[in-house]
Amino acid sequence: MLYLLFEYLHKHYDVPGLRLFQYITFRAAISIILSLIITTVFGRRLINYLQKMQVGETVRNLGLEGQMQKQGTPTMGGIIILLGILVPTLLFANITNVYVILMIVTTVWMGAIGFLDDYIKVFKKNKEGLAGRFKVVGQIGLGLIVGYTMYANPNIVVRETVQDNVPVTSTAPMVLRQKGNIFYYTQDVKSTKTNMPFYKNNEFDYAKVLKFLGSDYQKYAGLVFILFAVFIITAVSNGANITDGIDGLATGTSAIIGTTLGILAYVSGNTVIADYLNIMYIPNSGELMIFAGAFVGACVGFLWYNSYPAQVFMGDTGSLAIGGIIASFAIMTRKELLIPILCGVFLIELVSVIMQVSYFKYTKKKWGEGRRIFLMSPLHHHYQKKGYHEAKIVIRFWIIGVLLAIITVVTLKLR
């Protein structure tokens, strides 16, 4: 909102200093600052309010050291994160940008699902919260919205280099170079391509999944893209939810992921850097950096109270929203196939639960007694059972997260 106001004032009245708001990096910086202020200063007030309302966490005794001391710790702290994201985004981002609109919808959508789940647990005294099938329906719904918008919206395009033997005319796109009778020029087109590491030109077209259908396979490319969007949003959202099990783990890991995604959004939206890195240039996607700044600021600010020993838990209000935000952001910047690397911590946490449950059911059916691969799942509880202090587990998972983030960025130059 302030961005549009300042843009109007600068255009019509040439007010000194307002030109700064045209720079994405400046707006991203002040988004981080404002987000940190909101989450740290106003976060304390919200925690006091949650304590007053007796919105406390109900902890099951799993035999973990220090676990029962967390009984009654305020939950639903994800509200702090949501405010830290939405307020700076609404103030400093271009809210007419389709990518920004989609991210606001994602934040509110997944935050509402998580809030409903926490509300049922806390106020309705139902430990199970919102039924799993309703969460999945909400995640699928968001996936359909994001996937369809990305495929159908005319303002969402990628810039590709096209070659043709037609000479340049006054109506032709900008010619990059000419080689013999072949002209190379740029063109903004609708596309189902995405960045994929270790693949030719680092680009993969979802339509290729349907090549077996024959020459008409391109007609169904949108369906494949939407299905991938649904799967990615559901998986990452659940992965973030499962990772939120010990103080600061999900929050810190998400801040690392958010920083990386912000960098990827900036380079993808900058025609010079995208050309240098030889990656897909996505017009107008650089505006997502403001959202990424608010997201990182909110996560880091929340750590002020969520680091060990936690004074507040984010609950599903925060964890489901964080997962949905990361997945949607990656899809919009065409980096969703980098998620297995970038969100490796979420992945191993989710896989550890799937492995544990599947193996337990298999062994119980085969031998009449369920056996376990890990001492406890998710994986962070396995290390707690082995006697590691949870603060040490969190720091080491953060280090792994930083390493995975570096590898993710490096893949941009690997062919």
Image (cartoon, rainbow, N blue to C red):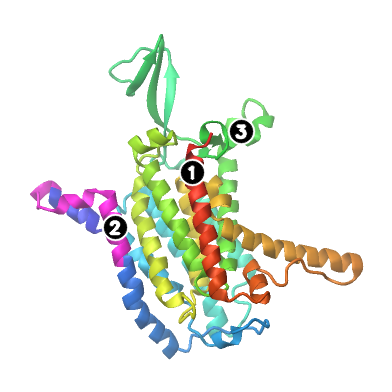
Disc on the earlier residue, 2 or 1: 2
The local secondary structure at tag 1 comes to helix
Vertical comparison of 59 with 161: above or below: below
Q: Which mark is residue 76?
A: none
Q: CA distance from mark 3 to mark 2?
A: 40 Å
Vertical comparison of 270 with 140: above or below: above
Visible residue check, residue 244: no
Q: Which residues are magenta?
A: 11-34
Instruction: Identify which residue, 374 or 324, lies in the foreground.
Output: 374
Q: Which residue is mark 2?
A: 29
Disc on the earlier residue, 3 or 2: 2
Q: Position of residue 18 (x, y in %)?
A: 15, 53
Q: Amino acid at mark 2?
A: Ala
Q: Position of residue 266 (x, y in %)?
A: 37, 46
Q: Residues within 10 Å of mark 2 (few under 14, many from 20)?
A: some
Mark 3 vs mark 2: in front: 2
Instruction: Identify which residue, 252 or 359, lies in the foreground.
Output: 252
Q: CA distance from mark 2 to mark 1?
A: 24 Å
Q: Quadrant of the N terminus?
A: bottom left
Q: CA distance from mark 3 to mark 1?
A: 25 Å
Q: Which residue is mark 1?
A: 410
Disc on the earlier residue, 3 or 1: 3
Magenta highlight on residue 398: no
Q: Amino acid at mark 1?
A: Val
Q: Which residue is mark 3?
A: 208
Magenta highlight on residue 28: yes
